[in-house]
Amino acid sequence: MQGYQFGHVETWSQQGATRSGGKVGRARKNGQRAWRAQQVLDEAERVEGSCNHVRRPNPTPQIIAGTCGSFAELRAAHEQAANVTQYFPYTDPKTGAKTTRKRRLRKDAHTLYSSVFSLPITSAEARADQALMNECLAVLEDFVAFEKDRIEAAGGEFALAVIHTDEAQMHIHLFALDRERGSVIDLHPGRAAFEDRRRHLRACGFERSLSKEAGDKLYKEAMREWQDELYEAVSRHTGLLRFGPRRERLSRAEYCLRMASREQNAKDESRAVEARKTRKAAEGLKRAADGLFELGNEQLAEIAEERAALGREKERDEIVRRENADQVNANESRARELDAQEERLRDASQDLVAQKKEIAEKEKIADRKYRSADAVLATAELLGQAENSPEQVPELLKATPVQANENVRAKLARMRRAPHAAVRMAEMFGAALTHLKTIAQSEAEASVENERRELAEGLNAVTRVTSFAAELIAPFVPPQSRENEHGKLRKLLMTVARVKTRNERRKRDEKGRSGDER
């Protein structure tokens, strides 16, 4: 950036400058316009009608916030500073008594501080080149930082700064306040030096010892010092010159050469600063790297120890894993054996249940058979008695049910103990048939027909007995097996009768052949 430094400081009041007669004027003694504080803020904010010197005003300028974030806050803060109450010591000229009095701040007191810093870069150039715009903004921010530190050191407050890019040159306006004292005279470098000297002289008892020439000299020296500080803090690092070509009466070529030299020096200084920063950062990084290297060596040793410990732990874990795998295999084998055993037990249990059901069913069938056989035996026993006829058997069974039941149970027990009880029952019928045959042989051939008739009647009786027994056992025999049981009973009785008849005939024939029969 080539050119020379431009910085300006000014203070403003609510009322504006006054003429010698006390009336508010439109111009200062130097011919400049007598701006009021409100007008200055309107121009900085680009309020319509207050910036006629700008061809195309930007209604939204860029603001750098301080204690105020907007112009509305700045106006409110300025109003508060302008209405502050001042306290001052007072000595009564008559009595000499010392007191403290208060009063409102005068309307012509300067309550708004502003400073301007302009760059030798046109706004059009900055808007066309973003890199140049960024460089300008960086320089303006450095100016804000410089002024903020100086104002706060003087007891004021940095309120707000605004950057204008709609005028010819890139520049910034900075505003400051003093809400405690109201007046911003102590924030202005030149006027603060003048007032400090006056206070000192008054404290020493010299009321009018400071002449105008001495005051102007103090003012100029203070402002020259401010310009020097601004140059050293901001302008020098951007390549700007402290003075313009008129000050040293330089030719155009000499001035351009000096500007180029200053710019190159600024770049060199910037590079040197960057180099120092880089070297310092590199040294810091080197120290950090050395520390990290040492720490890394320590951590490597710790990692090696931990790795060895982990290796040992891994070996132990591998041994335990193999043992656990063997145990798992054994457990799985045992589990499979237990599952197979459980399956076998489940099948055996199901077989036992089926066998129990089959046995229970067989016991039911056997019980029905036993009860049928007991009924038949009881009936046969009653029929075996000579005094009982088949027609009387049901009545006798009804008359003596207890005895019949006992006889049936006894017969059932005997049949369970001796399976040939049915044969003995058949022998009883056979004895009767044998008796009939003996009577028939002993008598004449004439009575044979009678015996045969009686035999036929006995067989009919047997048939009736068989039918009666079938009716008795019918409730105890299922319908599907009832006919089968009846057939078995008939077959049994007929077989017994047939066998006995055959045996008696054989005995009779043998007796006849031996001559015993007559």
Image: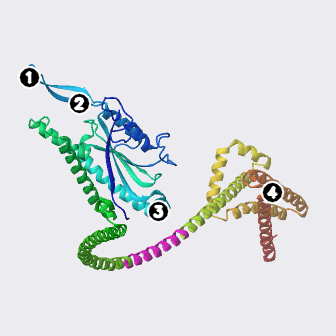
Q: From this viewpoint, which residue is outermost toward the top?
A: 94
Residue 244 can be seen, yes or no: no
Which quadrant of the structure image shows residue 278?
A: bottom left
Position of residue 300 measured from the top left corner of the image (x, y, whole percent): 27, 78
Which residue is identified by label 4? 462
Judged from the image, the secondary structure of the residue bearing numbered disc 1 is loop
First along the sequence among labels 4 and 1: 1
| Amino acid tagged 2 | Gln
Q: Residue at x 49, y 71 (%)?
A: 338
Asked if residue 35 is positioned above or below residue 276 in the image, the reply reads above
Viewer-side label of 1, 2: 1
Callout 4, which amino acid? Val
Question: Which quarter of the rendered picture does the N terminus lie within?
Answer: bottom left
In this view, the mark in front (3 or 1)? 1
Give the residue drawn at x 31%, y 79%: 311
Q: Nearer the viewer, mark 4 or mark 2?
A: 2
**Residue 334 is a magenta residue:** yes
Q: Which mark, residue 130? A: 3
**Closer to the camera in the image, 31 or 143:** 31
Q: Which residue does the numbered mark 2 point to in the structure image?
A: 86
Question: Seen in the image, is 303 located left or right of residue 518?
Answer: left
Task: Give whichever of discs 3 and 1 has the lower sequence position.
Answer: 1
Distance between mark 4 and mark 2 Cα atoms: 156 Å
The residue under label 1 is which amino acid type? Gly
Q: What residue type is labelled 3?
A: Gln
What span is in magenta? 322-343
